[in-house]
Amino acid sequence: MAKFVYRLQNVLDIKIRLETQAKTEFAAAMSKVMAEEDKMRALIARRRGYQDEIRQYSTGKIDVARLKISNDSIKAVEELMKQQAVRLRTAQRNLDKAREKLNEAVADRKVHEKLKEKAFEEFKAELNNEEKKEIDQLVSFTYNDKGKDTD
């Protein structure tokens, strides 16, 4: 029996590897975004802590030195938050690029898989046609052979 061989199997294999690589890059970009978001949340919590300190030092006996230190700390943390926001936006852009690359790789792989399926269907149809021809020849030979025996 004939064996199906897809001519572009190497290309399909490469597309599958590229998709796997794109998935890996997407996962790495996603983890980078999550790490940057965690850093931002930590900075926000730190700022809240300093703001709570200011409220605490503002009530009762006012400690001006502590208030100044807390205000300076808040300003420093807000500067860090601005820098972190830039890093977070960069990580988001990288994630978007990785997502686009992954979508493209998936689409390419699907196209090649459809081509393979189509080639396989054509192969099956061709095989079916050959079988029909063989059956017709066999029936024709048998019929012609019986006709000679009766004469």
Image (cartoon, rainbow, N blue to C red):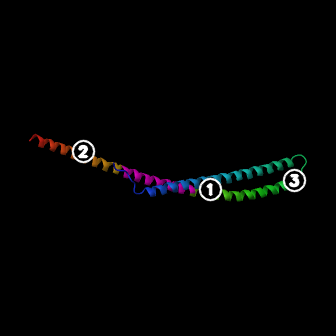
State which quarter of the image contains the C terminus: top left
Residue that appears at 45% across and 57% down: 10
Residue 126 counted in the magenta span: no
Rounded to the nearest angstrom, the CA distance separating label 2 from label 3 is 99 Å
Return the residue at label 3. 66
Q: Nearer the viewer, mark 2 or mark 3?
A: 2
Magenta part of the chain: 98-120
N-terminal of the pair, mark 3 or mark 1, is 3
Residue that appears at 31% across and 49% down: 127
Q: Position of residue 27 (x, y in %)?
A: 60, 52
Q: Position of residue 94 (x, y in %)?
A: 60, 58
Question: Is residue 134 shown above or below 14?
Answer: above
Q: Position of residue 141 (x, y in %)?
A: 18, 45
- Are the residues at dot 1 and dot 2 in contact (C-beta closer than 8 Å)? no
Which element type, helix, strand or loop, lies under badge 2? helix
Q: Residue furthest top?
A: 150
Return the residue at label 2. 135
Circle 1 Cα neighbour tier, 10 Å, few/some/many (<14 / 14–19 / ≥20): some
Picture quadrant of residue 68: bottom right
